[in-house]
Each structure stands twice: as structure tokens, then as C-alpha cells.
Amino acid sequence: MTAQPQSASRPALLALSPRARIIATFALHALSQGGLFSRIPDIQQNLGLNEAALGLALLGQPVGAIATFLFASAVLEKIGTRRILMLAIPLLSATVMLIGLAPNALVLGLAFACYGVLFGLSNIAMNVEADRVEAQSGNRVMNTCHGVWSLGLLTATLIGTLARGAAISPALHFALMVPLILAGTALVVWPMSPAPPRAHTGTAARGRIALPTLMTLILVGFAIAGALLEGALRNWSVIFMRDSFSAPAWVDTLTLPSFLIAQTAGRLQADRLITRFGPVAVARTLLAVALIGLGLVVFSPNLIVALIGFAMVGVGICVSFPLTTSAAARLGDRPASENVAALTLVTQITILGAPALLGYVATTYGIRLTFAILLPFVLIALYLARYLAPKPAIPG
């Protein structure tokens, strides 16, 4: 059950359909991150951290997220998606500002932990709401939501690139984003009337951890490749360019826009393609593209080839998380929030040590090997894509 009425009517300055409103919420969530990952090199240099120390600080994000996923489903079922998003999105923006103000590695790690808590809670809430809108309308919207999220993240990243070029400090850059996110939350999230939960069998695990089932564990195996690649790209792609080639700082930052533009374009087309060809065929085709792109990155002789590789990876993993989330939400054996929370929890636990491990590999063996060790995970995902086939709908 949820504490918020499904038919609640609230004054809205911005008239949007439920589909358009959840899509806009995804965009706002992405913007609330303020282009954080485009400023990681600046934060690293300001604090004088090497890659290993930075990796340990970045570990705070998955630790915070995992702590959240332990109770996310119970909180969501009790207070509802809208209230979570109303609080978490503005607080996420404020936490990004605190990351920019961190005076040392310890505080940076703690700030990233807070970021992980807020990101995890809001991420579960908006994905569950998107699935509910999808179930209510009968039309796929999840990939479009994530495509618009990528577009929002791309916009924030480009703002970060401009801020780097203008020599604006990360703290000031992030602080300027906070009032914009507050205004967006009032326009987009406040008037939201949540969709009804998807039909399911079983009962909600009230007050308990939503433990993974065998099927969610299989879906985790598919999701890991996309999660690792996206995390590696956000955390290390700018550093890869900086350490591998001689180019101005703003050129190094183009890896993230290259990746995000490709990811966004793929996601915005994905719902149509999945409806026509099915999730398994689309996932396998795109993962093959990711495999080739990752190879180009690892063996890139110049920055142009590297940028092409990063773009191919962006296209290749564009549907990994949306398809896995939809597959978990559609299982129907229990509330969608439990399956989504369990899926995300196990995924995060599985990749918990990735930032520190990749930082160690980069420091000890070079930044290229950091990306090379991810190749086997893409091959595993290619095999497990078979489990994305949709399950029969449960009568409502």
C-alpha cells in the first residue's frame, strides 16, 4: 500500500500527462547531479589525490546506495513515489554541492556516501513510477525515460565542460544548480498524481529486506556489464584521455558527451525497436556494438578513435539498465518495487569494489587495462540476454 492517494489533484503551473511528467522527472533527476562526473578530475587535482585514493573516495557512492536499497522498497510502499522524489531530488543537488566543497578525501568519501543514499532512493522511486505508468498505459516508456535522463545528464555534463573552460570552481558551479533544481521540482514533481501499482502475486515484504530470487540474480548477471562500463566511463574516461593523449582539458572532457549523446540517441529509439524486434534481439545486437567499441578504446592509437569507441559503448549499453529494470518489475511474483530494489541491491553489492579495483589497476598497470578487464563481462551479458524475454501478464 501507499500513503499517497492515487487520484490526488494538485495545482500545476505545467500541465503534463502522466507519461510526460515521469519523463520530465527523469530529466530533472539527471540535471540534479550537476555534471558532477565531468568535474572529477578538477576535484582530484584540488585535493591532490592519486587514482587509488580517488577510487576509495568514489567507493562511498555504492556503499551509500547499498544501505538505501536494504529499505528502499519498504519506504516506497509506505510513503509513495512522489514524496520520495519531492525530497530526494533537491537534496541530491545540495549533496553534489557538498562534494565540490569537500576539503579532503575522507569528507569526499562521506559526501559520496550521502550522494549514493539519495541517488539510490530516488532512482528506485522514479523507475517504479515509470513502470506503473507503463503498465497503466500499455505502452513502453522505460527506455524513453532513461533516454531523456541521459539527455539531462548530457546537458549537465556540457555545463560542466563550459564551467571547466571558464575556470569556475566545482563548488560554485554546483551551487548555481541548486535553485534551478528546486524550481524544477516544484513544477514537475509537486503536481504528480502517482499511477497505481502493477498487478502481482504474493505480498510486500513490509519492514523486511527484499531478498533476491533466482530470476533477479540471473538479471543481475546481465546488468553487471552495463553497470561496470557506465561507472568506468563516468569515473575514468576523462582521466583516460588526459593520461593517454596530449590535448587541452576541455577536449579530455568530450568523452562524457560522446558517450552520453550515443547512449541518449539509442535509448530514445529503443522502445520502438524493442516493440518491433523484442528485448532479446535488441539487447544482443547492441552488446555486440559495445564489445567492438570497448576494443577500440583499449587499443585506440589516438583520441579520435577513443571517442568513437566511447560512443559505441554508449550505444551498446543504452538499454542494459532500462531493460533489466523492466524485466524485474514485470516478473509479477511480488510488488515491482521489491524486485527492482533487490535487483539494484545485488548489482551494487556485486560491483561494490569496482571503483577501488579500477583505481588500483589504473595506478599499477595503466589506465587502458582498466577498460580491458571489462571485456569478459560483456560476453557474459550477451549470453544472459535470453532471460529478458517478457513474462505473461498477471490479470489485474
Image (tube, rainbow, N blue to C red):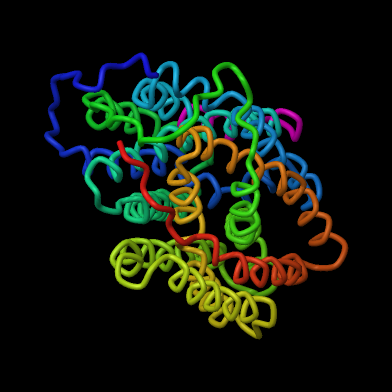
Task: Determine the residue positioned at 59% across, 56% down.
Answer: 223
- Taking 380 as reference, is 332 left or right? left
Give the position of the N terminus as an image quadrant.
Answer: top left
Q: Please give the range of residues in magenta.
A: 93-107
Q: Residue furthest front?
A: 395
- x, y (%) of residue 99? 59, 33
Residue reaching furthest to the right = 364
Residue visible at 78% across and 48% down in the picture: 356
**Direction from residue 383 to residue 36 in the image, left or right:** left
Residue sitting nearer the eye, 169 or 79:
79
Quadrant showing the C terminus: top left
The residue under the point 66% across, 85% down is 301
Picture coordinates of residue 185, whole percent (x, y) = 30, 28
Nearer to me, 42 or 275 = 275
Residue 173 placed where, x, y %? 46, 39
In the rendered image, the vertical position of residue 208 relative to residue 307, given as above or below: above
Figure disc tally: 0
Residue situated in front as seen by the camera: 24 or 9: 9
In the image shown, does 161 or 128 lie closer to the viewer? 128
Q: Residue at x 70, y 34 (%)?
A: 63
What residue occupies the far bottom of the structure in this picture?
Answer: 301
Name the chief secondary structure element in magenta. helix
Q: Does the magenta-highlighted stretch encompass residue 98?
A: yes
294 in the magenta segment = no
